[in-house]
Amino acid sequence: MKLDSRRVPVPLLALLLLSLFEFAYALPQNLAVPGGVAVIPIAPGETATYNNRPVMVIQDQEESFAIVGIPLSEKPGSHKIKTRTRVYEFTVLAKEYETQHLTIENKRQVNPLAEDLKRIRREQSEMDNAFTNFDTEIPPAFNFSLPVMGPVSSPFGLRRILNDQRRTPHSGLDIAADEGVPVIAPATGKVVVTGDYFFNGNTVLLDHGQGLISMYCHMSRIDVSRGDVVQEDDVLGAVGQTGRVTGPHLHWSVSLNNARVDPNLFLVD
Ligand SMILES: [Zn+2]
């Protein structure tokens, strides 16, 4: 939340700052667009659903917020979350993402063979299982640091044209770095998937609790195993160029209630 101090009366500002400091954490940024996150105040002690799926709820002593991931495919307009006792409406604003044209030399990675499709489907279901998990035993950890330092080579949400063929939008953030640079956990999480995938190469998925899952792709090596609990800054593996890539980089996805959302909304300075 950005406060404009020129407009807010000083006592109110002090009150607002005080209430922010009551949280031992910063809430994700509220940006209700396709691929964004809606932060919705709700009555304390409630659970909430969006499109009939449970959503993350962060409770403080007196305040409670539903943290809702909005899919890139969601239509702008009025949407609702439901709690046991009431319905909360919120507005999803339109957002135009840019188009990116890429040339992939390995044609099989753009038009996979039948045998590849079998493998791709199996891998997709492994990832979907993780993305749809809603673990209430892991205390939600959502104040992220960057998993690797480097320039963003491809932002979240780009509409993608590969070898002149339209593909699904870019559901993560690409950070360029040299092969071998360590990839670190952005926050506490449990390793729920590791694998060598057709498109994503060496991949790790972390469960941060209540439907918040992060994914790390194209790594040269993986240093963690399924079931490991990692802390912020623990090494997950190293940057590489495995899977469908045009050069070494980390593809970082963040998923909330099974919606891939912009990882920037979870970064804390
Ligand atoms: Zn990517």
Image (cartoon, rainbow, N blue to C red):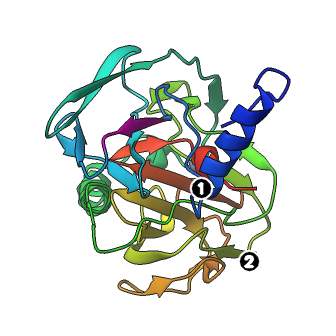
Residue beneath label 2, please?
180
Q: Is residue 154 visible?
A: no
Q: Is residue 228 visible?
A: yes
Residue 196, horizontal then vertical, whole percent: 43, 71
Q: Taking 225 as reference, is 11 left or right?
A: right
Residue at horizontal 39%, vertical 56%?
Answer: 59
Residue 2, horizontal then vertical, whole percent: 72, 34
Q: Is mark 1 within 8 Å of ligand 1?
A: yes
Residue 234, horizontal then vertical, whole percent: 62, 83
Q: Which mark is residue 86?
A: none
Give the mark nearest the N terminus, 2 or 1. Answer: 2
User: How many neighbours does mark 2 have within 10 angstroms: few (below 14), some (14-19), or many (20 or more)?
Assistant: some
The three-letter amino acid code for the residue at tag 1 is His
Residue at horizontal 74%, vertical 32%?
Answer: 3
- Please tell me which residue lies in front, 212 or 226: 212
User: How many neighbours does mark 1 have within 10 angstroms: few (below 14), some (14-19), or many (20 or more)?
Assistant: many
Q: Taking 198 as reference, is 84 left or right?
A: left
The secondary structure type at the circle numbered 2 is loop
Q: Which mark is residue 251?
A: 1
Image quadrant where one finds the C terminus: bottom right
Residue at horizontal 56%, vertical 18%?
Answer: 95
Q: Main secondary structure of the magenta part?
A: strand
Q: Quadrant of residue 80?
A: top left
The three-letter amino acid code for the residue at tag 2 is Gly
- Please tell me which residue lies in front, 102 or 181: 181
Q: Taking 255 as reference, is 7 left or right?
A: right
Q: Taking 17 as reference, is 51 left or right?
A: left
Q: Is residue 39 magenta?
A: yes
Which stretch is magenta?
38-43
The secondary structure type at the circle numbered 1 is strand
Residue 195, horizontal then vertical, whole percent: 40, 74
